[in-house]
Amino acid sequence: MILEYKGIDVFYTDQGKGSVVVLLHGFLEDSSMWQNVASELVEKNRVITIDLLGHGKTGCLGYVHKMEDMAAAVYAVLRHLKLKKYVFIGHSMGGYVALAFAKLYPDSIKGLCLLNSTYQEDDKDRKQLRARANKMAQSNYENMVRMSFANLFSVESKLKHIEAYNNALEVALKTPVQGYMAANEGMRLREDSSIFFAEAPFKKIILLGEKDTILNTEEILLFTDKHNIETFVFSEGHMSHIENKKEVNKKLLFFIE
Ligand code: MLT
């Protein structure tokens, strides 16, 4: 379905009945990444998926999509559907958006699952990497997408899940260059949410991949241990919903219940 928002189309899906779960995809993904998870959750829940700004069938609003801009578009969809309380599951960038949402609209959050995601801001190196990637994207976009994508799966699981890998890469390559650059800049500018997340009153969980090269798993584990935040580490990389599909579904079902 489409919601017109600030002159652009925002694509979303709405299936099932019950308590509301909102699924937010990551960078270079779209709502189709949730097909498998949604089919499990939809038996007992109302499941909403949304294409974030500049991704999938949702248009671009500008040249920088801050996480707050993405969160505001998500809020527009949830308001349009007259939904008031929900659990968020955010994959990677989707987790950053869910955190921005939780800060903007704290009363509406029942729970938040960061899947291969973090409450941390980018460190200096990562900020530089993003700035460089955005420069390269202007001249050699396809290569840039392929490079950004290459590290997401662990080496073993890329071979093991080659079909899912190719499907995900196909979605990534369809992301418009403006969507890539605006999201990358938005992620570069995002603020740290460590204290906010540690102190937030809602139910929370972090699901990580042991071989994820995007996140600093060790640092996250130290922090979540100190702050008593439920955390689980799967065996593979940044794409746990594909690489550790069954275990992820089980954890998510349990978290939602
Ligand atoms: C994602 O998968 O959403 C991104 O890789 C996250 C990031 O670049 O920080």
Image (tube, helix red, strand yellow):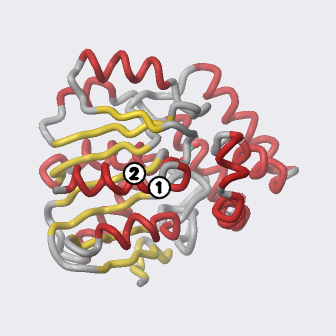
- Residue, disc 1: 245
Q: How many residues crowd around disc 2 within 10 Å: few (fewer than 14), some, or many (20 or more)?
A: many
Residue at 33 percent of width and 43 percent of height: 99
Question: x, y (%) of residue 133?
Answer: 74, 39
Q: Secondary structure at mark 2?
A: helix
- Above or below residue 182? Residue 156 is above
Label 1, ligand 1: CB separation under 8 Å: no
Instruction: Check whether the beta carbons of the residues at disc 1 and disc 2 lie within 8 A of each other.
Output: yes
Q: How many marks?
A: 2
Instruction: Give the residue type at disc 2.
Output: Val
Question: x, y (%) of residue 208?
Answer: 44, 36
Question: x, y (%) of residue 66?
Answer: 47, 47
- Camera-side residue: 31 or 247? 247
Quadrant housing residue 250: bottom left
Q: Is residue 117 left or right of residue 188?
A: left
- Residue, disc 2: 248
